[in-house]
Structures are given as structure tokens and as C-alpha cells.
Image (cartoon, rainbow, N blue to C red):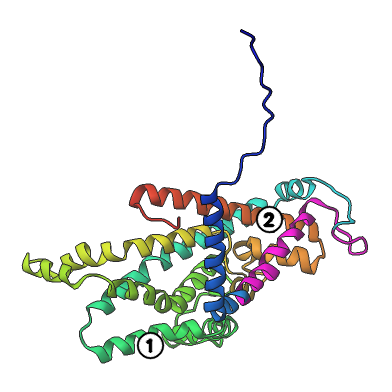
């Protein structure tokens, strides 16, 4: 009996009919949804184009941090210098001062600004007089819509050394007023508490919305069990807004290196510069005023990377501790 070897040539596996049907069904479903809801897709295109043009495309310009940028040669024609700009920033005597000022100012703002909106929302939620609740909410919410420039002008008028309202009030009692705008030790307090005044009412709205979603049956059960108002707040209100609070805390800590530029810059003066110079103002002065675009881009890129690392770390810690996070 003779053995016959049959040669089999490998052939491309045929496409599964089920896979083709699934692909065609998905494509037809997408086209149907596009025809049916084309107005919504048209509205989505506008914000997508905004983020694409003004957020994602400019990311390519971060390559300036690794180049000796020349306006004549352009971004891509300028020679590469590697990490020279980062090394120059690390060797700069103001490096640790910038890091310390940015972290202290941002950390102070987070510590002062995070619990107060929660407290305000809980107190407003306990108020039964609707007219008082609405009035208090309006009074605390309105400062958020005041421009930063106007707020800084108000601060200067109130805290001016000789003609400000605070100086006049101290002078009425025969006491010399402290120089709140010139003394570097007061800069952080002025910045943070004016920011708290401006943003607390707006931030409390988010927690009021979270409190409105709490099941009323939980309050009834707590009352039946004899829980006092403080106990109901601690065991019903706080757990109800905890996921929202964790998300806001993660976002706040994730942006801890991105302290607001406008307000710091407007409150800055040569006397308080030792405590008011932060990374954002340094990038502005280095990049736009001194035209050193390479150093400014390198510092800004480093700042963004640190923010990203902090955001990831805080989100991971929040998920492990409380079970809630951004993702």
C-alpha cells in the first residue's frame, strides 16, 4: 500500500458570516442614529473642534522645550538641545522658591476651600425658611460672577496701606494697621481667603445638588431611630455627598501645581515677590517678557507632568480608601 502525501497550501480563512453580519449591523445602526439625531451630532462637533484646535494641536508645540527655539527658523527648524532647558531650570536659584510658593499657596487654598462649601451646603440644606435659604444662597453665590480684575481692585481699595477701609478702621481706634499688601507674610492669607469668599457659594451648589439626591427614607428612618439633627447630618448627609466630595478633591489636588495666574499676578508687587512668585507667573515673565521660550515651555511642561502624576496618585488613593474616583 503506497503512502500518498497530499500537499495542503495555507489559505486565508474565510470571513465569518456572523462577523460580517455584526459589522454590517453596527455600521447600519450608526448611520441610522446619525440620520435620526444629526442635530445632536452637529452640536457635538463644535466643542470637539474647540478641544482639537485649541487643546490638542498646541500640544505639538511642547517640542520647544527640547529645542533652541528661533523665531526665524521656526519650531521644527530650530536645533535640538535635549534636556538643557530642564537642567537650567533645576540649577536656577529660584527653583525651590517657585516650587515651595506654588505648593504652599495651592495646598493652603485646597485646605481652606474644600470643607467650607460642604459646611455651607449642609447648613443651607437644614434651613426650613425658603426665603432665608434663597437669600443666603444668592448672597454667597453672587461673588463668583465678579471678574478677577474687579475682585483684586476691591482688595486693593479695602487693604490699601493709608487710604484703605482697614487702615481707616484701625486708625479710628488709634492703632497702626498692618501692611497687608506689602508684607510678604500676609500675601497667602489675602489670596486664599478672598478666593474662598468668591468661590464658596458656587461650589456649594454642587453639594446641594448631591444632597437633593439623598433618599428621604433615610432621614425618616434616622428620625424613627431617634437620631438628632447632628447625627442625621453625620450619618446621612455626609455619606450622601462623599462620592461628589472625593471627585472634587481629586480634581483640586490634581491641579495643585496650576495655581491661578491672574489673581496672583495682579496682587504681586516687588515687596511681596518672595512669597508671591509661583510657577505660572515665572513662565509668563520668562516666556513673554524675556522671550526665553525654551525655558518657559520646559517649565510649563514639567508643571503639567507633575499635575498629571498627582492626579493619578490621588485618584488611585481615593479609590482604595473610599471606592470612588474619576475612573
| Residue on which the image places disc 1 | 138
Give left or right: position of 175 versus 136: right
Give how far across and how far down residue 103 sits, in percent: 54, 57
Query: Dot 1 lies on which element?
Result: helix
Q: Earlier in the sequence, mark 1 or mark 2?
A: 1
User: Magenta part mainly helix, strand or loop?
Assistant: helix
Give how far across and how far down residue 50 sits, in percent: 65, 73
- Give the spatial CA distance, label 1 vs label 2: 39 Å
Count of numbered labels shown in the rendering: 2
Query: Dot 2 lies on which element?
Result: helix
Give how far across and how far down residue 228 sits, in percent: 12, 68
Give left or right: position of 177 versus 86: left
Of residues 219 and 52, the one drawn nearer to the viewer in this rendering = 52
Residue 37 makes an appearance in the image: no
In the displayed orientation, state which residue is furthest to the top.
Answer: 1
Residue 260 makes an appearance in the image: yes
Instruction: Based on the picture, tell me whether residue 198 belongs to the magenta stretch.
Output: no
Amino acid at each position: 500500500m503506497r503512502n500518498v502525501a497530499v500537499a495542503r497550501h495555507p489559505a486565508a480563512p474565510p470571513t465569518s458570516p456572523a462577523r460580517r453580519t455584526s459589522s454590517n449591523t453596527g455600521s447600519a445602526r450608526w448611520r441610522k442614529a446619525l440620520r435620526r439625531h444629526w442635530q445632536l451630532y452637529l452640536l457635538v462637533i463644535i466643542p470637539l473642534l474647540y478641544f482639537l484646535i485649541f487643546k490638542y494641536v498646541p500640544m505639538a508645540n511642547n517640542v520647544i522645550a527640547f529645542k533652541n527655539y528661533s523665531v526665524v527658523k521656526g519650531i521644527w527648524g530650530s536645533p535640538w538641545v535635549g534636556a538643557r532647558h530642564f537642567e537650567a531650570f533645576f540649577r536656577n536659584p529660584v527653583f525651590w522658591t517657585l516650587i515651595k510658593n506654588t505648593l504652599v499657596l495651592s495646598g493652603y487654598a485646597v485646605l481652606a476651600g474644600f470643607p467650607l462649601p460642604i459646611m455651607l451646603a449642609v447648613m443651607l440644606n437644614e434651613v426650613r425658611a425658603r426665603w432665608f435659604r434663597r437669600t443666603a444662597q444668592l448672597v454667597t453665590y453672587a461673588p463668583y460672577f465678579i471678574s478677577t480684575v474687579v475682585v483684586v481692585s476691591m482688595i486693593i481699595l479695602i487693604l490699601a496701606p493709608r487710604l484703605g477701609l482697614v487702615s481707616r478702621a484701625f486708625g479710628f481706634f488709634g492703632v497702626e494697621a498692618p501692611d497687608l499688601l506689602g508684607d510678604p507674610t500676609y500675601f497667602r492669607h489675602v489670596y486664599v481667603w478672598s478666593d474662598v469668599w468668591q468661590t464658596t457659594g458656587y461650589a456649594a451648589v454642587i453639594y446641594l445638588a448631591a444632597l437633593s439626591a439623598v433618599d428621604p427614607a433615610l432621614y425618616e428612618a434616622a428620625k424613627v431611630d431617634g437620631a438628632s439633627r447632628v447625627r442625621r447630618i453625620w450619618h446621612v448627609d455626609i455619606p450622601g455627598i462623599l462620592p461628589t466630595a472625593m471627585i472634587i478633591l481629586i480634581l483640586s489636588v490634581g491641579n495643585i501645581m496650576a495655581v491661578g495666574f491672574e489673581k496672583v499676578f495682579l496682587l504681586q508687587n516687588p515687596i511681596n515677590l518672595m512669597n508671591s512668585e509661583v510657577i505660572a507667573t515665572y513662565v509668563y515673565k520668562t516666556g513673554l517678557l524675556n522671550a526665553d521660550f525654551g525655558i518657559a515651555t520646559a517649565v510649563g511642561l514639567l508643571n503639567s507632568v507633575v499635575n498629571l502624576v498627582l492626579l493619578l496618585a490621588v485618584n488611585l488613593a481615593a479609590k482604595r480608601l473610599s471606592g470612588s474616583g474619576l475612573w
